[in-house]
Amino acid sequence: ALVVPEQSIVLRPAGEVVYVIKDAVAQQRIVKTGMYQDGRIQILEGLQAGETIAVDGAAFLTDQTRVQIQAQQAQR
């Protein structure tokens, strides 16, 4: 199953969306969600495994916004 952090799902007039980051541009993608567990939400439709999505600050994005990707910090 494909799952994403709950903060990456944003409610917009079009429905539930995630922002896929491609070539430093945020692209709005409507998704269909499934089960929720421990801060993660299952994606049933609209997103492919391996795509880069916005997590922190996703709610502040709009379609076609230029973004700067920061390196992930190792979690312990």
Image (cartoon, rainbow, N blue to C red):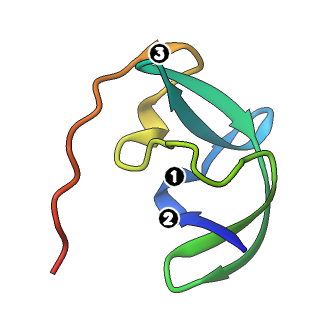
- CB contact under 8 Å: marks 1 and 2: yes
Q: Is residue 74 left or right of residue 25?
A: left
The relative height of residue 45 versus residue 68 in the rendered view (above or below) is below
Q: Which mark is residue 37?
A: none
Name the amino acid type tagged 2: Pro
Q: Secondary structure at mark 1?
A: helix
Q: Which mark is residue 65?
A: 3
Which residue is at 41% across, 19% downward?
Answer: 24
Give percent across and percent down for residue 48. 71, 49
- CB contact under 8 Å: marks 3 and 2: no
C-alpha distance separating marks 1 and 2: 6 Å
Q: Quadrant of the N terminus?
A: bottom right
Q: Secondary structure at mark 3?
A: strand
- CB contact under 8 Å: marks 3 and 1: no
Give percent across and percent down for residue 40. 55, 74
Q: Earlier in the sequence, mark 3 or mark 2?
A: 2
Name the amino acid type tagged 3: Thr
Q: Earlier in the sequence, mark 3 or mark 1?
A: 1
Give percent across and percent down for residue 74. 17, 66
Which residue is at 50% across, 43% downward?
Answer: 53
Label 3 Cα neighbours within 10 Å, binned few <14 / some 14-19 / many ≥20: some
Which residue is at 71% across, 35% downward?
Answer: 29
In the rendered image, which residue does mark 1 sit on?
Answer: 8
C-alpha distance separating marks 3 and 1: 15 Å
Name the amino acid type tagged 1: Ser
Q: Secondary structure at mark 2?
A: strand
In the rendered image, which residue does mark 2 sit on?
Answer: 5
Q: Nearer the viewer, residue 24 or 12?
A: 24
Q: Quadrant of residue 76?
A: bottom left
C-alpha distance separating marks 3 and 2: 21 Å
